[in-house]
Amino acid sequence: MRVQSIRLEGEEPTWTVLGADLLPAREIESYLEFLRQTGASPNTVKAYARGLALWWEFLELRGRSWDVFGVEDFTGFLGWMRSGLPPGVASLSAAPARIAAATAAQRLQAVRSFYVFQQWRGIEGIPALFLGRKSSSSYLPFLTHIRRGSRAASVSVKVHRRRRAAPTLTPAQIDSIKQACARWDPGTRSWSGSIRDRLFFSLLEETGMRLGEALSLQHRDWHSGGGENPYIEVVPRPHPHGARVKGGNYRKLYISDELDRLYAEYVWHLCEAGLDLVVEDIDASYVFVNVAGGKRFAPIRPETIYKLIARIKRVLGDLVPARWSPHWFRHTHATALLLSGRPIHVVSRRLGHADVQTTLNTYAWVTEDEELRALADWAAATKQWRDGHADI
């Protein structure tokens, strides 16, 4: 099985899975088309295609059909992904896993979701991925009456992942990154370097936007203050290079006057370079565009940002973490807000999470760690208790 990219002019890139006959695998393609039609991102389609291609490959090795298997096949699939050994072959010594726990969990989820889709289509006899359990709650969710059977479903095979703190950057590291992009010379009262690149990382720092959201910004989304609080609109729309607003949700982000002024400097720089002579509708054009290389004033690709990051890493060396990425700015933004006492539901809305539970799952450790750190001084933390029991 092979995962194949598909690129059609004017449309987002997508992926399918080809069989030995070089034709799309029918059952997989029907599910991938369902994902496309329901608004799944190209990255989700690609990841799920990869997971299902591996599942098909594993079933062929075990002589199984996609619609006839047992739970032992699913656990075997997990072990096969981790070890790379043929089914039925065990290693006599412990070996490091070939893939991260998060990757394994994502691929298992792709397979589970595929079979849930097949059950929706009316295909019976696929119970191995879930176990029935009685609910401890009297609450009945919407549409529960159409379920087959009366028992709630829980996942039968799980990947246990150790919760890790989201990686963050320090204020000094962020300043170093921005300074590596462009510097303000108070003597000449001018910028040296790339204002575009500095604006990009300043935007990520101050808003916590995702990479795709930042690259999807158009000038009409940026509302300068004019005496009031400037703000940015995050608007779902197609991007020529596949960048997108995750979840397809609109939100408004208020920003500082300082960031707004940097944007104004950048727009002035673009106009000096001839943007107004080349682009017919500036409002509908993208904020982050090619200035030096590539097609002039065309929207930049995500790969351009990663190449920029590689250059910054070479320049700064040990001053910044070796593996930092644009998403670290998002984690840093959320962490800084929570440690500053902002309510988690407000942070969740600013980040654009569909559910506050996502924010809690990712960042609950921030406030938990701060609360636990406060107990480091045992005497101070227990003073009231000790004073109340002084005479006992």
Image (tube, helix red, strand yellow):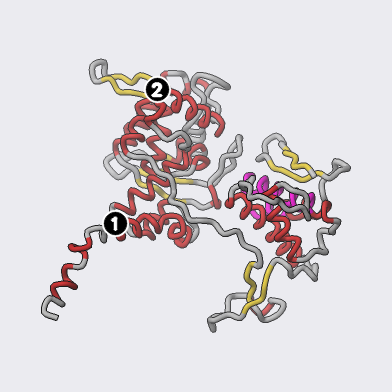
On screen, residue 390 above or below 71: below
Residue 302 pos. (x, y %): 55, 34
Residue 326 shows in the view:
yes
On screen, residue 95 above or below 378: above
Front residue of 306 and 8:
306
SS at badge 1: helix
Quadrant into which the C terminus falls: bottom left
Residue 64 pos. (x, y %): 84, 58
Q: Type of residue at label 2?
A: His
Report the magenta residues as a range.
Answer: 33-58
Quadrant into which the N terminus falls: top right
Which residue is situated farthest in the bottom direction here?
Answer: 138
Count up the numbered dots.
2
* Residue 268, disc: none
**Which residue corresponds to mark 2?**
269
Q: Around disc 1, counting alpha carbons within 10 Å, would you say few (fewer than 14), some (14 to 19), or many (20 or more)?
A: few
Q: Looking at the magenta stretch, what is its main secondary structure?
A: helix
Front residue of 219 and 258:
258
Please tell me which of labels 1 and 2 falls first in the chain.
Answer: 2
Q: Please report the residue visible at 48 percent of the width from the left and 58 percent of the height from the top.
A: 358
**Which residue corresponds to mark 1?**
373
Q: Type of residue at label 1?
A: Arg
